Amino acid sequence: AQEQALRHLADGDARITLIGPQPEIAPFYLGFDVYVSAARFEPFGLTILEAMDAGCALVVTRTEGPREFLKETNVFWAEPNDIASLATQLRDAATRGRQRPAYDLTQFMRPQAIAAIEEFYGTVLARRKVSG
């Protein structure tokens, strides 16, 4: 029902192309200037990393996951459930021009992520041995 309503709204507007489900959307981010995550709850956010990899500016709600993994990243922070905050951050992101930020994604690369997971489990196991 929502898809039909959306198709009806887009009908006749040459600026809009509805391409349907896609197996891989990461390449589409290259066409975006700004990525917006208006999530009320976001434990991590793989799509945010894909947008960062493409160099999109980020407008993100201050939810648990992004607050943690984007804490040292230049982000336009909006408050969850706050439309005015989101609108303000979108305007601010739009006024910065079409500059493509370069993000350091090193910590999310496979070798670094595996090392971090192994370190985490090593710490948990060491604590278990001490308290066991």
Image (cartoon, rainbow, N blue to C red):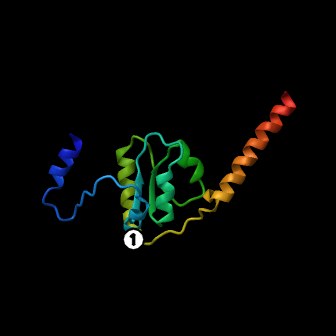
Residue 40 horizontal/vertical position (percent): 43, 40
Q: Quadrant of the N terminus?
A: top left
Closer to us: 7 or 78: 7
How many marks do you count on the picture?
Answer: 1
Residue at 63%, 62% in the rendered image: 106
Whether residue 14 sits left or right of residue 32 in the image: it is left
Most distant residue in the right direction: 130
Q: Position of residue 68 (x, y in %)?
A: 59, 48
Q: Residue furthest front?
A: 23
Placement of 91 over or under 8, stated as above or below:
below
Q: Is residue 31 above or below residue 116?
A: below
Classify the position of the C terminus by image quarter. Answer: top right
Disc 1 crowd rating (10 Å Cα; few below 14, some 14-19, many 20+) is few
Q: On screen, 61 above or below 93? A: above
- Furthest toward the left, the residue is 12
Q: Residue 7's x, y, as percent?
A: 18, 51
The residue that disc 1 covers is 97
Kind of residue at badge 1: Gly
Q: Residue at x 73, y 44 (%)?
A: 120
Q: Quadrant of residue 94?
A: bottom left
Secondary structure under the numbered disc 1 in the rendered image = loop
* Residue 50, image x, y percentages: 48, 59
Vertical side of 82 occupied by 46: above or below: below
